[in-house]
Image: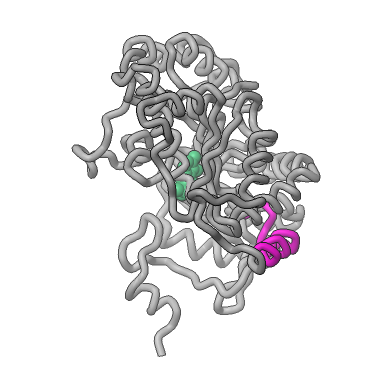
Amino acid sequence: MSTLLERDRRVVWHPYAAPEARPLFGVESAQGVRLRLEDGRELVDGMSSWWSAIHGYRHPRIEAALEDQLHRLPHVMFGGLTHESAVRICERLVALSPEGLERVFLSDSGSVAVEVAIKMALQFWQSKGRAKKRRLLTIRGGYHGDTFGAMSVCDPVTGMHGLFEGNLATNLFAERPVCRFEDACEDADIADLAGLLEKHRDELAAVILEPIVQGAGGMWFYSPDYLTRVRTLCDEAGVLLIADEIATGFGRTGRFFACEHAGITPDLLCVGKALTGGTLTLAATLTTGEVSAALAEGEAGVFMHGPTFMGSALACAAANASLDLLEEGIWREQVSAIGDQLRVELEACRSMPAVADVRVLGAIGVVELHEPVDLSIVQPEFVEQGIWIRPFGALVYTMPPYLIESDDLSLITRGIREVVSRIG
Ligand SMILES: *Cc1c(COP(=O)(O)O)cnc(C)c1O
């Protein structure tokens, strides 16, 4: 009989992987902050399943909400029909997001939430009789998803734009902000973006960026001051601002939304990942009253998008349960305690030969190396250490579930120190 891994390698694709993914580990179950492998080994999860499982796995409150929803209404089409769980999650997102965001479009993944935001920005300018405004400006080092519109604003190098040349919209890229989170933003730090905005204002629909934390494009934390200035520059140039909070939303950076570090309201805001606490896929795009009013007045009179599984009742129920947990407020102390502990326990990495930089923000710890890691070597080493850490490129990073206990977090940091110390 073939093993799970053998069967997998015959027919399954994995993210950003060759057809026969290696190394690969079978997961049998998960509970709290632990993944249980097929062979009985247990790993402390340092990744929250890519930012999403903020309450750990199988949280009883989320399970109860799912069970209740499952027995009443798992899903119903959202065209012409509505239901309590969807209305409630939209009301709550509006209440929790920066002042001025008033209407919510639900979708099924982060990439689609970004597509929706881009489409809304284009339809907005159409409605205003400014149809030439249809390009986007972003900063290098960004990541916004894998569909074509989203890909066109990912970092052109790490996003391998060359592969898809001719099929991708040609957007504009400003230098990434060099000013760190702790620093002020000098005029020089934003000169490139300011120049591009000024030069191309008549053809620009929107600036799109990840506020404060650039995630998969480089795990880079930049100055809130920079973001404040981007908001002002967009207003001056008459260009919309799209904030992609798919990774940063729901407390990960120490604020509920990363935009709060700068006190700004974007014209469009995308959320996803942790929205359901990592149980089901759900994403959303929030807009201001001004944007939604303009769409209603435009030629189409409607917003031209509508996923089949829009407003999935099960996903919305999970999201409401996750927000219930967040609204109890314990996440604030948890995120800040994780950050403090990561700062202390990852510091020893800084002097290791392979390490270029160590940085921590909120409940995110990053060890940046000089050279990309060889996953075929380091992935099994992390598993040997009893932790689940999935580096990409030269970045070894962790963003554990908020409820992780200090001893378990120490297992993660000790494992990272041990594996990184053997590199280079
Ligand atoms: C993960 C991510 C996306 C894409 O979300 P998917 O659910 O994978 O489609 C978009 N933007 C950011 C900032 C992300 O981290």
Horizontal side of 173 relative to 297 (left or right) equals left
**Position above or below: 83 against 343:** below
Image colouring: one colour
Residue under the point 58% across and 50% down: 82
Using the image as rendered, state which of residue 144 and residue 299 is in the foreground: 299
Using the image as rendered, state which of residue 393 and residue 225 is in the foreground: 225
The percent position of residue 16, horizontal first and vertical second, equals 37, 55
Horizontal side of 341 relative to 23 (left or right) equals right
Residue under the point 75% across and 57% down: 407
Position of the N terminus by quadrant? bottom left
The percent position of residue 343, horizontal first and vertical second, equals 68, 39
**Position above or below: 288 against 346:** above
Using the image as rendered, state which of residue 316 and residue 159 is in the foreground: 316
Residue ranking furthest to the front: 80
Horizontal side of 99 relative to 206 (left or right) equals right
Instruction: Say how many tags the image has.
Output: 0
Residue under the point 62% across and 41% down: 90
**Position above or below: 130 against 283:** above
Residue ranking furthest to the bottom: 1
Whether residue 148 appears in magenta in the rendering, the answer is: no
In magenta, the rendered stretch is: 53-69
The percent position of residue 335, horizontal first and vertical second, equals 72, 42
Residue under the point 44% across and 24% down: 297
Residue ranking furthest to the left: 166
The percent position of residue 365, horizontal first and vertical second, equals 61, 43
Residue 4 visible to an observer of this rendering: yes
Quadrant of the rendered image containing residue 63? bottom right
